[in-house]
Image: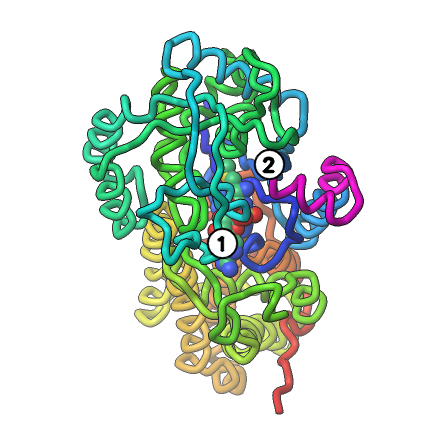
Amino acid sequence: MPKRFYVSTPIYYVNDVPHIGHAYTTLACDVLARYKRACGLEVFFLTGTDEHGQKVEKAAQAGGETPLELADRVVKRFQALWDKLDISNTDFIRTTQERHKKGVSELFKIIEAKGDIYLGEYEDWYCTPCETFWTETQLLDGCCPDCGRPTDRLKEESFFFRMSKYQDALVKHIEEHPDFIQPKSRRNEILNFIKEGLRDLSISRTTFSWGIPVPSKEGHVLYVWFDALTNYITALGYPEDQEGHFADFWPGDVHVIGKDILRFHTVYWPTFLMAAGLPLPKRVFAHGWWTVEGQKMSKSLRNVVEPNMLIDKYGVDPIRYFLLREVPFGLDGDFSHSALVHRINSDLANDLGNLVSRSTAMIGKYFKGVLPSPVENADTDEAFIGRFPKALKSVDTQMNDLSFHKALQSIWELIRAANKYIDDTAPWTLAKDPEQAERLGTVMYNLLEAQRLIALLISPFLPGTAQSILSILGAQTGEAPLVSDTAWGGLKPGTVIEKAPPLFPRIETD
Ligand code: MSP
């Protein structure tokens, strides 16, 4: 039976249209999912939309729509963007779907039957944009400590979840599972928060109606985070299909999220699961935030980076490359057009694009486009070939650490080594001497074979480019190429090699 891997994105609010921040989380998950599939794992890759809550209700009212009309409209934009960004998700969950609503009510009933949910009264400060209650002391100058916007005083009858009961168990879990919260720097932040004392959590609202009804009492809808977090298991068929999909994929391998929603995923979600007697996800990884040309991205600054426009202008693979190469995953980063253009011109057009076009042009010129047989490797060749198994190993470790920028660095070291191999072996000089014909054949074979392996390694990041390179090389690959096709020598001598069109046109700058 193949090993399995479950990776999820957060589900996106539908009161906003997709921007570069959303694209970033989804892209990181896609690259991981593609990598694991290429390694032969059976992957469940989930994304979706978070459609309930006061924020969505208010946005719909403002636009003269019903919340569901708003959601239907915005969901299409997310799905279209994921198609355009080459996202390979297995499923797309919407919290307004029946399968989800049923699962959430069941989870509530299970926790309630256990005695961990009770009816009480809630009074505190509420930040509607963040859908979060804050205590007096948490407010900053009366405003939300997360987003800085004004909060409202709310008092209402509410169901409470006995989160406090799970404080010690949660601390123990985090301490015993050093990989549960990543990057490491985030772990202490959460541990300190928990150790300050967990309060019981209000998990129902009576002041609006756009949500999943509380099963045991009319007039209450479930708190949007109780509803939303449960998507990670309702998408697997919980609670009905506990023998099937759910048993196969839960506990999930990694929830990839932004740093702003870490507390929900590492405090609320695990305690809900503990109360329901379910295992906790293996890992929660929080990435950083993008600013734009040095400024916070916001509608009011009119600097929201729209991924569709970027893809139309630069192409999908360059955008995928830039987002994961530019900033170490886990840290904040800045999006700037000059950095993007620089990466495209230097890493993609110069390093990778030139490598492929130079080599295929030489095969055309010296061997009429037919791949020669290698004869005898010299020391330079062996040293060059020896880099590949090492790089495959490093990339594997780096991918498992979600260290995408390092994995790309490792791959680019190979690309640069291949360019240097051309300069060192100087095929144009060998071509002038008929006695060096075998040597020239060996060099050219190694060069093209190296590009086959490079294409396999870049394929999770740049799927379209990898396909183009493999087809130029006439290379065949199996379902799990990083397992079956990484031994040196996969290209068959005699294969016809196409002359490569420019893979990445250089972008002219002023
Ligand atoms: N609906 C909740 C998640 C529920 S998951 C059970 C939510 N949605 S969101 O649409 O507001 O945000 C989704 C993700 O986008 C978050 O992980 C957030 O960190 C990410 N980003 C939003 N703006 C961002 C940047 N400027 N930069 C990077 N990521 C950002 O929260």
The quadrant holding residue 72 is: top right
The quadrant holding residue 386 is: bottom left
Of residue 336 and residue 470, the one placed in the foreground of this image is 336
Residue visible at 42% across and 20% down in the picture: 120
265 with respect to 15 (left or right): left
Residue 15 appears at what percent x and percent y?
A: 65, 47
| Helix, strand or loop under label 2 | loop
* Disc 2: CA contacts within 10 A as few (<14), some (14-19) or many (>=20): many
> Looking at the image, can residue 16 be seen?
yes
Q: Identify the magenta region.
A: 54-72
Instruction: Tell me the tag on residue 53.
Output: 2
462 with respect to 185 (left or right): right
Amino acid at circle 1:
Pro
Instruction: Tell me the tag on residue 150.
Output: 1
445 with respect to 259 (left or right): right
Q: Residue furthest bottom?
A: 510
Residue visible at 40% across and 26% down in the picture: 251
Instruction: Tell me the tag on residue 305.
Output: none
Of residue 101 and residue 46, the one placed in the foreground of this image is 101
Of residue 74 and residue 453, the one placed in the foreground of this image is 74
Disc 2: residue Cβ within 8 A of ligand 1's nearest atom: no
